[in-house]
Image (tube, rainbow, N blue to C red):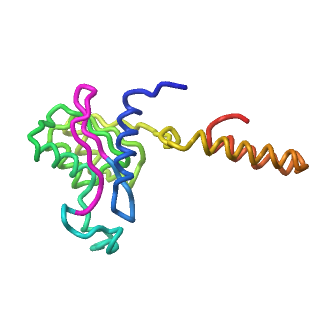
Amino acid sequence: MERITWDQFFMAQSHLLALRSTCTRLAVGATVVRDKRIIAGGYNGSITGDEHCIEKGCYVVDNHCVRTVHAEMNALLQCAKYGTPTKGADLYVTHFPCLPCTKSIIQAGIERVCYATDYKNNPYAQELFEKAGVTVVHVPFDERKIDFLRDEKLALYTEMLHELRENGLPAEKLLPYEQKVSALFGIKL
């Protein structure tokens, strides 16, 4: 098995946090890291004690859900709540930060932002990061690397393909399925 980099490791943490999201429009996770140690994490969801989008639906104003606190803000607020300094830290986030989160990230003293997926990348946010000297890094992340059932799924697909082959499915009809399984798992069958 290939060992993942530190950037991939912390990005994986952000993707795990995104699985806790209560937003039905987009699940986002963020991890604050200093000296290769996680100091906080957050995901997008409602404030403590309020209704969640998964329960009541999104509360959309001007094409933006106002019910949720963004993942980056939740991570930074967790630091503030527990007295953990963010100056000089890195932030790993599943999606490029929105403009309001960008401003908060800069004000919190974050020095490096790593994101996995472009998402409405605001040119002014990019400009602000540059002016503030915040390093922005695109860290592509393969979510298959955190699929806890990967081996079981691969075994099932392989068994099914074997069964189809044994039952006489012609090779030319089997080939597209083998190609899809290979692409899905990033392997060669």
Q: Nearer the viewer, residue 10 or 16?
A: 16
Front residue of this view, candidates 85 and 19: 19
Residue 88 against residue 49 in the figure, above or below: above
Residue 111: image location, x then y, percent: 22, 34
Q: In which quarter of the image is residue 129?
A: top left
Which quarter of the rendered picture does the C terminus lie within? top right
Magenta-drawn stretch contains 4? no
Percent position of residue 117, x then y: 42, 47
Residue drawn 21% across and 51% down? 73
Give left or right: position of 41 versus 25. left
Residue at 35% over, 43% down? 14
Quarter holding the N terminus?
Answer: top right
Residue 53 location in percent, x, y? Answer: 32, 68
Quarter of the rendering containing residue 7: top left
| For residue 41, above or below residue 54 | above
Count of labels in the image: 0
Along the horizontal axis of the image, is 40 left or right of 187?
A: left
Residue 12's spot in the image, x, y percent?
40, 39
Q: In this view, does 20 lie to the left or right of 89?
A: right
Q: In the image, 144: left or right of 14?
A: right
Magenta residues? 30-46
- Placement of 93 over or under 70, stated as above or below: above
Q: Which of 168 and 124 is in front in this view?
A: 168
Q: Which residue is drawn at 29% across and 67% down?
A: 52
Overall secondary structure of the magenta section: strand
